Amino acid sequence: MSKSREKQKKQNLKSLKEIIYVLVEGRTGNKSETTYFNCINRSLTNKVIKPTTKKNNISREMYRTKKDNTYKVVVCDTDINGTHSLETFTSELQSYIKNGYTVYISNTSWETWIACHFKNLLPNDYDKTEEWYSSHENIWQDNNVIKKAIQKSNKVCDRFALPHGISTSDDLQTFIREYEDCNNQPFTMIGFLMQSII
């Protein structure tokens, strides 16, 4: 096969891959969410994950490529009564939905999802200082570990009757209604996102 044909074949295969833009809510910088999704991306064959902390990056690239097989999602923390009030948080979610994002929430922080890889979810039972949080980056590429994390996190969401992601006004109303019963419990919807990726 000539080099030009081989190059064209690679480009065609690349264009067929699903592209998932992951907007990491919060301040810019070296975020663990971005590191995690970049690690996952290395093991994928039919999808590409592009994490970013800047919404404009997603808008520009989607406009430039104009591909049909693209999806955009947001991963965010509740942190209600920390940096958010419920009213402010609801308003942010409504904005994302209006702009075509599906939102995946962790209560109260992203570390809830990381914890699912190592233990069952219990209130106040993990934090960033634990050894496994910073020293097991290679495990993010182990699908068996990720599948177990998915089972743990999804089971908690289903127990609280939480939506599997928030992409409609009905999803948002369900979340707000059920959140009152589980706002002191760790939960994360990231498992449902990962279920669609791996």
Image (cartoon, helix red, strand yellow):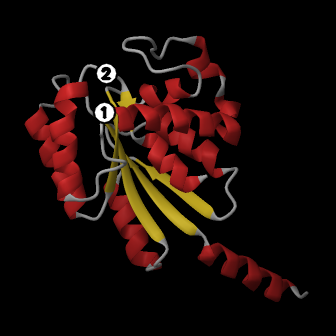
- For disc 1, the marked residue is 160
* Residue located at (38% from left, 11% from top): 124
Q: Are marks 1 and 2 in contact (CB under 8 Å)?
A: yes
Q: Is residue 182 left or right of residue 87?
A: right
Mark 1 vs 2, N-terminal side: 1
Above or below for 62 versus 78: below
Tell me the amino acid under the disc marked 2. Answer: Gln
Density class for disc 1 (Cα within 10 Å; few <14, some 14-19, many ≥20) is some
Which residue occupies the foreground of this view, 100 or 62?
Answer: 100
Residue at x 38% of width, y 47% of height: 53
Q: Measuring from the top left, give residue 116's x and y in whole percent.
A: 52, 27
Residue at which label 2 appears: 185
Q: Quadrant of the N terminus?
A: bottom right
Query: Is residue 83 visible in the rendered structure shown here?
Result: no
Q: Which mark is residue 115?
A: none
Give x and y (percent) for residue 130. 54, 11
86 is higher (above) or lower (below) than 19: above
Residue 37 sits in quarter: top right
**Residue 180 horizontal/vertical position (percent):** 16, 29
Is 26 positioned to the left or the right of 121 in the image? left
